[in-house]
Image (spheres, rainbow, N blue to C red):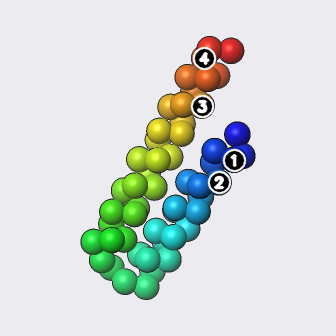
Amino acid sequence: MGKVVSPGIIIAGVALLFYAFEKSKIADILVIAAIVYSLIIVVIVYINYAKN
């Protein structure tokens, strides 16, 4: 579980750093990617939980 969540935290951290230093298209893309990634993880965890 921890191994799955950590990449999302890293992506979010990088996105926040980009967002803090420069308001760019890259920052927007990273923020959206981090949000989408988090939602996908939540769905996967929910499905696994529902199976059990």
- The image's mark for residue 6 is 2
Q: Position of residue 9 (x, y in %)?
A: 59, 58
Between disc 4 and disc 3, whose residue precedes? 3
The mark that comes first in sequence, 2 or 4, is 2
Mark 4: which amino acid? Ala
Q: CA distance from mark 1 to mark 3?
A: 13 Å
Q: Is residue 52 above or below residue 1?
A: above
Q: Which residue is mark 1?
A: 3
Q: Residue at x 43, y 85 (%)?
A: 21
User: What's the residue at 41%, 47% (across, down)?
Assistant: 36
Mark closer to the observer (2, 4): 2
Q: Are marks 3 and 2 in contact (CB under 8 Å)?
A: no
- N-terminal-most mark, 1 or 3: 1
The numbered mark at residue 46 is: none
Say which quadrant the N terminus sits in. top right
C-alpha separation, residue under disc 2 versus residue under disc 4: 22 Å
Which quadrant: the C terminus? Answer: top right
Do tag 2 and tag 1 residues touch (Cβ < 8 Å)?
yes
Query: Mark 3: which amino acid?
Result: Val
Give percent across and percent down for residue 24: 30, 77
Question: What's the CA distance linking mark 4 and mark 1?
Answer: 20 Å
Q: Please rate how many residues cluster around mark 2, counting C-alpha atoms within 10 Å: few if below 14, some from 14 to 19, many from 20.
A: few
Residue at the image point whose x is 55% and y is 68% from the top: 13
The three-letter amino acid code for the residue at tag 1 is: Lys
Q: SS at mark 1?
A: helix
Residue identifier under label 3: 45
| Image disc number at residue 50 | 4
Q: CA distance from mark 2 to mark 1?
A: 6 Å
Q: Based on the displayed image, in which of its 4 quarters is residue 45 positioned?
A: top right
